[in-house]
Image (cartoon, rainbow, N blue to C red):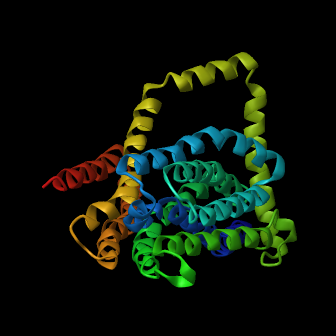
Amino acid sequence: MKNDISISEVEKSTIRKLSFRILPFLILCYFIAYIDRVNIGFAALTMNQEIGLTATAFGFGATLFFIAYVIFEIPSNMAMEKLGARIWIARIMITWGIVGCCTAFITGPISYAISRFLLGAAEAGFFPGVLLYLTLWFPKRYMARIVAVFMVAIPLSNFIGSPLSALLLGLHGLLGLSGWQVLLILEALPAILLGLLCLVWLPNTANNVKWLNQEEKEWLSSTLTFEKNQLLNSEKQDSAEQKKSKFKLLITNKYLWFFAIIYAGSSATSNILSLWMPQILKAFHLTAMQTGLLNMIPFGLAAAFMIVWGVHADKSGNKSLNTAIPLFVTSFGLLLTIF
């Protein structure tokens, strides 16, 4: 019994240290990633007219980002397996930071489209890379809540990024640059700095860190090794034919496609709001700062309710209902914007 209590205390202290040492930094990285992905929506308030970009051309460029993201996702993941998550996360951040800075010097629709495609290619693999890195540190039973906290970076990036982008947009004339150029450069530079910091801050394994004591290192190593061996043993027991059969069952599972469509719709809504809402609000003759302050409202509420609703969903146990209600509220809110 005493040994169980000792193990429990070691587990608590280990997870607590991991949560405070690794998770905040990765959340900050994803926060910057999402700002660099959607800040073009604020830049468009003055950029579109300055470089002759129509709404159609702007939307086409936004689409190219996601096309590149899909194309390079698998190659990026393959490279990550060979080079390691830490190095690959750093590479991704440095590359997208450079592309983000270069976007400030686009001159028309063609260069804009190319820059969005390159940004999508640069960012591809970041999210799965972070998930892979987290699995190297957190036991499986903690991953759901860790990922939930990590995902809060998405609405937070819009909540904080909206007024910040509006403020930077007002720095027109700084170093002879337009406001949108200042915005894109200053919001891209942190990605490069964080990418370099990844190589120093994020450790490869628990063996070479000083902030875990020997007992905590041993608990973490034994727990993760046990989970890995369980997975390997499960895979060994399945023949090639059984693996093929399982894959076929997965692909033909109607619930998989049903939830994929739901997530696609939810994700599309979020990205559309991020990219187009600043221009929609600006059409009401608001200032850039007023636009930024109004744009932050839905994302601030989203960040708060992601945590509150996640806890509620865990306690209630009815996952279907707790998924349907937020989607219904989102749909109803979007319908109200028509009026």
Pick the residue in front: 55 or 245: 55
Residue in view at x 34 percent, y 64 percent? 278
From the viewer's perspective, is residue 246 above or below residue 130? above
Q: Is residue 17 visible?
A: yes
In the displayed orientation, state which residue is furthest to the top: 241
Residue in view at x 71 percent, y 45 percent? 76
In the displayed orientation, state which residue is furthest to the right: 208
Percent from the top left, x then y, of residue 97? 65, 65
97 relative position to 110: left or right: right
Placement of the C terminus among the 4 image quadrants: bottom left
Residue in view at x 76 percent, y 48 percent? 80
Pick the residue in front: 235 or 177: 177
| Number of numbered tags placed on the structure image | 0
Percent from the top left, x then y, of residue 126? 64, 54
55 relative position to 107: left or right: left
Q: Name which quarter of the figure residue 215 lies in.
A: bottom right
From the viewer's perspective, is residue 125 above or below residue 157? above
Percent from the top left, x then y, of residue 262? 38, 40
Residue in view at x 58 percent, y 20 percent? 248
Pick the residue in front: 17 or 38: 38
From the viewer's perspective, is residue 272 above or below residue 192? above
Placement of the N terminus among the 4 image quadrants: bottom right
293 relative position to 256: left or right: left
